[in-house]
Amino acid sequence: MNSAPANEFGRKLNEVLEKKSSMNFSFIPGIKAVKSRLIEAVSTNHVAHAQLFIGKPGSLNLPLALAYATFLHCQNKQAGDACGTCAACTKSLKYIHPDTSFVFPLGNVKGDKDEDRFKADILKTWRSFLLEQPFGDLGDWIAFYGGEDKQALISREESREIIKTLSLKPFESPYKVMIIWQPELMHPSASNGILKILEEPPANTFFILVTNAVEKLLPTIISRTQLVQVPLLEDEEVGEYLDQREVSVERKNEIIALAEGNLNFAIKLIDSEQDHYQDRFSNWMRASFKRDYLKMVSLSDEFHELDKLDQRNFLSYSLTMIREAALQFSGAVKLNRVKGSEVKFIQDFSKQLNVVRAEKINTLVSEATYHLERNGSPRMIFLDLSLQISSVFKT
C-alpha cells in the first residue's frame, strides 16, 4: 500500500478527492487510446458534430465527455490535456462554463412552482453531484437528488429546450457543447425532436451523447453520431486507483476481482462494510438448490434489511460468482479471478451448473438488479428470484 501518490495520476487523483475538483483527461485513469483519439481530433480540427460515447455500466464515458468539453473550451491547450488554469478551464472544472449545456434524466420530483428557479436549483444539484461523485452512475444521481421513488427520464419538453439553447450564439468559447447523459432514457418525443438539429447543428456546435445502453437508442440517433467506444478499466488501472486509498493488499485483490473494471463499483466496495458476501451467497444457492422455502424467506428478510448499496453489491457479487463457476465447469480455469476460500466454493458450486443453468440464473439476477434499481420491494424481488433459481436447479 502506497502512503503517497507514485505518479502524476496519483497526484491528480488526490486533488480530486481532497478538493472535490472535476476532471481533465489526466484525472481519468486508463482508456489512454480513447483519450488520444479525442485529443488528436481537436488538434487536427476533425471533431465530429455529434458523438456517441458508448460504455457498459461502470465505464468512465461521462467523466471522459466532461474532460473532452473542458479541452474543447480551453484557451491554452497543452500537448495532451487542457491547461486547467485559464478562465475557460476554471469555469469548466466547476461545470459553470456558459457554453457547455447539460441534459440529464430526472424523476418527477416536487420542486419550486417557479419553473426557472426550479431549473436553476436542479442544475446546481447536478453540478454538486459531478463534483462530489465524479465517477457516479445513474443510481447515485437519483439518490443524490432524492428521487428514489420515481423513475428518472428525460422529458418530452427537453428537445425544445435543446433547440432553444443551441439557437443562441456562444458566449465566450468558439464552440457550444451539449452533453446529453443517458439519452436512452429520453421520451420518444424528445428523441425524435432532436433528430434534425442532431444531423444539422448550428456552426461550431458539438453534441456529446453518453450512453450505457446503446441498444435502447433509436437507430436514427445512432446513425447521426460518430461512435466512441469507452471500455471498462483494466485490473491494473483499478489497482492503481486503489493504491491511493487505505486498502489492504488482500482487500485490494478482492475488490479488483469483484469490480471487473467498474471503478465506481470499486469505490463503493472500499466504503462498504460488506462481509465479503461469500457465506451469504453459498447459503442462498444451497437453499435454492434444496428448495428450502423457509430459508429462502429468511434470506429475503435479511436482504431487505441491507442498505441499497449492499443490496446492489451483493447481486453484483452473485453475477461474478456465476461467471467464475461457468469458467470452472467449461474448463477455462486460467481465467478464474477468485482467490482463497472462494476457489473451493467455486469448484463445488460449478458441479451443480451447466451452460443452460448458468445462463438462466445470470439472466434472472440481472433482471432482479434492474427491478431493484427501479425501487421495487427488495424482499419480494429477492424471494421471487430465489424461487425462480430453485426452479432452474430443479430442471
Image (cartoon, grey):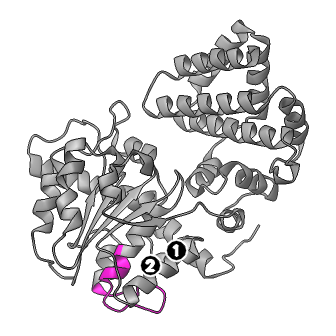
Image point 38% across, 42% down: which residue?
142
- Residue type, numbered disc 2: Leu
Task: Tell me if residue 23 comes above or below residue 188 in the rendering.
Answer: below
- Residue type, numbered disc 1: Val
Residue nearest the viewer, comparing 213 with 220 = 220
Left/right placement of residue 13 relative to residue 102 reads right
The image shows residue 145 at horizontal and vertical percentages of 33, 44
Task: Tell me if residue 5 comes above or below residue 101 in the rendering.
Answer: below
Residue 20 visible here: no
Q: Which residue is mark 1?
A: 34
Q: Check disc 1: other Cα within 10 Å, few if <14, some if 14-19, many if 20+.
A: some
Q: Which residue is mark 2?
A: 38
Task: Tell me if residue 19 comes above or below residue 210 in the rendering.
Answer: below
Left/right placement of residue 239 relative to residue 301 reads right
The image shows residue 337 at horizontal and vertical percentages of 80, 51
Q: In which image quadrant can residue 299 be found?
A: top right
Q: In which image quadrant can residue 94 be found?
A: bottom left
Quarter of the image that includes the N terminus:
bottom right
Would residue 199 be counted in the magenta stretch? no
Q: Which residues are magenta?
A: 69-87
Residue 6 visible here: yes
Would residue 71 be counted in the magenta stretch? yes
**Gap between marks 1 and 2, in whole Å?**
6 Å
Badge 1 marks a residue whose secondary structure is: helix
Image point 72% across, 71% down: which residue?
3
